[in-house]
Amino acid sequence: MEYRGYLQKMAAQSGEKVHYYLNLGSELIFMNELIGREIALTFQHKITCFCGKELQKVFRQNYCYDCFMTKPEAGQPIFFPEKSQAHLGIEDRDLEFEKRYQLQPHVVYLANSGGLKVGVTRKNARFNRWIDQGAIAAVVLAETENRYQAGQLEVYLKEHLSDKTDWRNMLSQGDPEFDLIEEAKRVADLLSEEFKPFVVENFSPVEMTYPVEKYPEKVKSITFKKQDECKGVLQGIRGQYLLLEGGGVFNVRSHEGHHVTFAF
Ligand SMILES: [Zn+2]
């Protein structure tokens, strides 16, 4: 079988095991059933920015220069929640967009993705967020009214916890064990008085299981910056990563907009 299209973030559905669908725009391909089979993604040297413009090269985060510099979807509050200002009525790039995005319940969470990390996300996007990061477990620590408050709380906790996922660790070293309820209690105690009212009453961790047959001992990143083909036997999927036999890993999300053929 061969499909053509441009890559978008894989769609994921939680369940006993996460189900993944490769999204090529017009086609959704169920990936779990391809585990154990050889797959090949071949770059067609064309990238479509989300504005629809076709590019040879992206500027940053798979955006063209104009989008990265002007669209609210690529504005500072997206990457740095603590810089959100819509609650003050201050515009970054598009106040209407920013109000819709920022002025809704957010959560600060702890997740185990090859290590313990803290993160911020919109409350109703949290499950997708955890799956996209490849977390095996996560717990909501605090809930806030808007993005700014959650960003401030996270900044405070960055003194004590990482806010990054170490993907090499996550995909090859196995996950350390944490009791997330105990961790949440410990972290809640670290908070200063101004943040304590946001802490949730009950900590209820959720777990995610990924379709991975075998983790590689050592991982090697495959990107279309360095090579045109990502080919091999698919051994598993976690987060937005395809894990291939031999240790090659391909981050689908970081290739959004890239035109490919997909064969299996
Ligand atoms: Zn663009």
Image: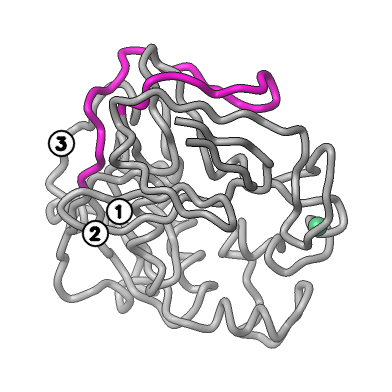
Q: Please give the residue where the numbered disc 2 appears in the rendered image.
A: 139
In percent of width and height, residue 236 lies at: 31, 31
From the image, tell me which residue sits under label 1: 110
Cβ–Cβ below 8 Å for labels 3 and 1? no
Quarter location, residue 260: top right
Q: Residue at x 37, y 71 (%)?
A: 195
Instruction: State the image quarter where residue 219 is shown.
Output: top left
Instruction: State the SS at label 1.
Output: strand
Residue 43 vs residue 141, the one in the foreground: 43
User: In this picture, which residue range is highlighted in magenta?
Assistant: 209-235
Instruction: Tell me if residue 233 is in the magenta stretch.
Output: yes
The disc placed on residue 214 is none
Q: Amino acid at mark 3?
A: Glu
Question: Does dot 2 land on a helix, a strand or a loop?
Answer: strand
What x and y, as percent, mark residue 124?
Answer: 38, 74
Q: Quadrant of the C terminus?
A: top left
Relative horizontal placement of residue 236, taking residue 184 as reference (left or right): right
Could you tell me if the residues under marks 1 and 2 are in contact, i.e. CB atoms within 8 Å?
yes
Say whether residue 228 is magenta.
Answer: yes
What residue sits 68% from the left and 41% below the top? Answer: 259
Amino acid type of the residue that numbered disc 1 sits on in the rendered structure: Leu
Q: Ligand 1 falls in which quarter?
A: bottom right
Which badge, 1 or 2, comes first in the chain's sequence?
Answer: 1
Q: Which mark is residue 177?
A: 3
Task: For mark 3, give the secondary structure.
Answer: loop
Image position of 189 (left or right of 119) = left
How far apart marks 3 and 1 lie (CA) works out to 13 Å
Residue ID at (43%, 48%): 29
